[in-house]
Amino acid sequence: MNKCIGWVLVLMVSILLSGCSETKDTVTAPDVSIAKQIAARYLLAAEPEGVVDVIAARETAKNEEEVVVVGRIGGGLKPFVDNMAAFQIVDNSIIACSDDVADGEACSCPTPWDYCCHTDKLPNAMAFIRFEDEQGQVHVLDTKNLFPVKELQTVVVKGVAKRDNAGNLTIVADGIYVRN
């Protein structure tokens, strides 16, 4: 048997067995405490200075450079990554489908945060945000359980820019400010 398959099977069995042996209270209580600690580490009380829009950051930010970026959570049907402190933001200049007014009425899109009315503009107007632990791994907690955010929420993220060969921009966040 392949070692990887063996490890995957061991992991799956361990998860199943641990789920059967623990009560709901012992599983959720530590998670709430950990989530509060992580949120306190990143949540900023005031908006940081030097804010740039996503498009400007994509054009100018260099790899490993400190940046402060503003954008709206969205860019896909599911802008939040399940079970991870990670999400996508879109430049504020791109109009969400719910904001796209034609003849006095907004577009009646069920998921306006996917920007389906303007998908042609998205590739150069998005950034990926992630919150990492001390070992450089993304925190394994849903973003919505950490911060008071939702789809189309405007956020200001402070962190380090990471660039890939395709020009995509990821911000390894060390702070988040949630605009009202």
Image: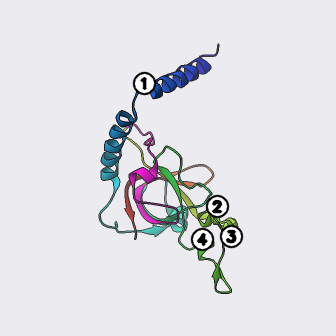
Numbered badge on residue 119? none
Work out how far the residue at label 4 is from the one at label 1, CA to CA, in angstroms: 45 Å
Check disc 3 and report the residue beneath it. Answer: 117
Are circles 3 and 4 on residues that touch, CB within 8 Å?
A: no
Q: Residue at x 32, y 60 (%)?
A: 44
Numbered badge on residue 123? 2
Work out how far the residue at label 2 is from the one at label 3, CA to CA, in angstroms: 14 Å
Q: Report crowding for label 4: few under 14, some 14 to 19, many 20 or more residues within 10 A (C-alpha).
A: many
The one nearer the camera, 48 or 177, is 177
Q: Amino acid at mark 1?
A: Ser
Q: Position of residue 82 (x, y in %)?
A: 53, 46
Q: Secondary structure at mark 3?
A: helix
Are circles 1 and 2 on residues that touch, CB within 8 Å?
A: no
Q: Taking 83 as reference, is 170 above or below it?
A: below
Q: Residue at x 64, y 86 (%)?
A: 104
Are circles 2 and 3 on residues that touch, CB within 8 Å?
A: no
